[in-house]
Image (spheres, rainbow, N blue to C red):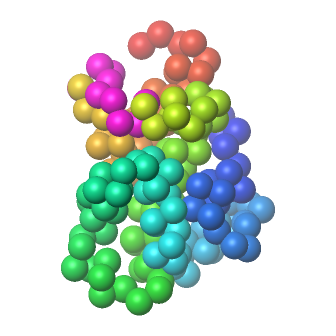
Amino acid sequence: MMPVTAEKIAFVMALAPVPHSFAELDAMVSKGLSKKALKTSVSRIYKNAAESKKLLYQIIPEATYKRRRETLTAEESGRVERLARIFATAEYVWSSEQDTQTFLTTPHLMLQDQTPLQVSMTELGARRVEELLWRLYYGIPA
């Protein structure tokens, strides 16, 4: 049930070279992604600079982010990948970047009136958001 490919997730983060499998993507995440991958992912969700910065510092605290030279830790990179995966999945379901942004930033009843973005800050929350997205995609009632 994962039609979202490693390439699509990498596209959200603007990774180069582009991984062609989840194993390659996992290796890149384990090694540490660039700060640019985080900035690019966040800018796909929020076009407003203030909102982008707020989300960026929610994923990696401001002081920590500023200490990083170029590369994030494996744990931080995992958070960036999770954000990109949720975005790529939502974009697959909605077929529109604008609809994806709206979905991610609008409170949803099935997520206890939290936004999918808020819920996906943890891995289990991200799984809940992915499950919701696939239910919407396949037209499965709650």
What predominant SS class does the magenta segment belong to? Answer: helix
User: Residue 70 appears at what percent x and percent y?
Assistant: 47, 86
Q: Residue at x 27, y 65 (%)?
A: 57
Q: Quadrant of residue 13?
A: bottom right
Say left or right for 90 vs 128. Answer: right
For the point 47% across and 10% down, the residue is: 141
Q: Is residue 138 above or below residue 112?
A: above
The answer to whether any part of residue 85 appears in the image is yes
Quadrant of res 107: top left
**Span highlighted in magenta in the image:** 103-112
In the rendered image, residue 123, in percent from the top left (x then y), is placed at 39, 51
Quarter holding the N terminus is top right
Residue 51: image location, x then y, percent: 30, 52
Q: Is residue 54 magenta?
A: no
Q: Is residue 108 magenta?
A: yes
- Whether residue 129 is visible here, answered yes or no, is no
Q: Is residue 95 left or right of residue 39?
A: right
**Percent position (x, y) of residue 29?**
55, 71
When asked about the image quadrant of residue 24, the answer is bottom right
Picture residue at 74% right of the left edge, 60% below the top: 21
> Which of 85 and 26 lies nearest the eye of the viewer?
85
Quadrant of the rendering where the C terminus is positioned: top left
Question: In the rendered view, would you say 65 is above or below 82?
Answer: below
In the image: residue 31, left or right of residue 82: right
| Residue located 39% across and 71% down the image | 76
Please tell me how many numbered marks the rendered image carries. Answer: 0
When the figure is inspected, residue 45 is found, relative to residue 31, above or below; the finding is: above
